[in-house]
Image: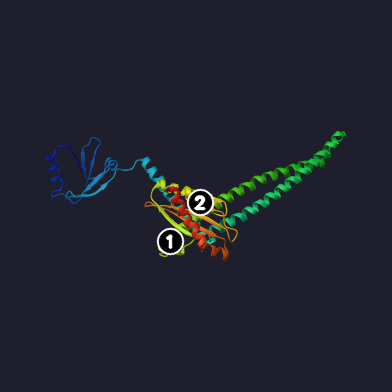
Amino acid sequence: MKNIMIKPLRTLSLLLVVATLFSPLTHAKKYYRFVNDEGQVILIDQLTPEAVNKGYDVINEQGQLVQSVPPAKTLGELQEEKQRQLEEKRKQREQQRQIRRDAELLRLFGSAEDIMRARDSALLGIEQRQELNNNDQQLLKASLEDLQRRAADYERLGKPVPQKLKDNITSTQKQIAERERNETIIEQERESIVANFERDLIRFKELQAKRMAHKFKNNRDKSNQANMMVMSCNEVEYCKNIWQLAQVYAQTTASGRLEVVTDTIILTSAPKADTEIGIAFSKLPSKADTQIILEVSCNNTDAGEQLCASSEARKVVQGFQDFIDKQLR
């Protein structure tokens, strides 16, 4: 193996060496150039562990650079790279799960009101189970008091408490403990239902807002969209102020109460009568600007649809713009 060490400022020697290496008498082959620990440029015709660790250039017999190879990665760097790859795969799996969940949400529900109705139905079932469990618990406690009173009567008379009575007391105590455990389990189920439906509701509104913003952008005749409005802002503080005012406007204008308030979604309860309206705000941040979408919703009836297409809905939409102008002027 040829090993040529090139020291700084020894240009003449370098030229001689290169001329020798690349003369017509030499066979066509590759050479490897790297810098050692002393800062010296080394030219070799076979790779060494030192060159691999330091990183090297591949030179052809004409003295031309063919390829630059970076230094070999350390054990720590290899481990970091492995962790990055695992994290990337995890993110890809999570993204695929989210895509499937988004498709399922859009398939199952046509509106945010549908999600809230499904949530309320599930919570009603939980409340019924809680009521039954509480009633059982009260009956069992009353029965236990009666059994314990009878056992006390035996003891006052100096008589032994019958074994059957003792067994009944023990059994009733176990049943009461079971109902208490059920109470905890049912409450945990209720909290899980609330959290899951809130997550689905927020995600549904995010997906819906993106579609609405795209539709609004491509619809030239925006005057026909009485129940919605899209406004843009490009200053962080100004957008923040608008979002805070949106919460106030929703709370004071909608027929129902606030259901969800996050950094991207403000949603009131679903209208239950033909004269009621709901309000939803969605925020879609982007690099260029932030879009804030206002949507007025109505009861899912013919009369409700007419209300959302009427001048009343348009007044609610325009009222928000007037409210913003008044508060931020």
Q: Is residue 25 above or below residue 311?
A: above
Q: Could you tell me residue 6's position as x and y percent? A: 18, 39
Comparing 307 with 166, the one in front is 307
Residue assigned mark 1: 216
Q: In which quarter of the image is the N terminus?
A: top left
Residue 248 visible in the picture:
yes
Q: Which structural element holds mark 1?
A: helix
Q: How is the image coloured?
A: rainbow
**Count of numbered labels shown in the rendering:** 2
Residue at (66% x, 51% y) in the render: 127
Residue 199 visible in the picture:
no
Q: Which structural element holds mark 2?
A: helix
Residue type at numbered disc 2: Tyr
Comparing 118 with 10, the one in front is 118
Q: Could you tell me residue 232's position as x and y percent? A: 41, 54
Q: What numbered label is drawn on residue 224?
A: none
Residue at (73% x, 48% y) in the render: 135
First-in-chain label (1 vs 2): 1
Q: What numbered label is drawn on residue 249?
A: 2
Residue at (25% x, 44% y) in the render: 56
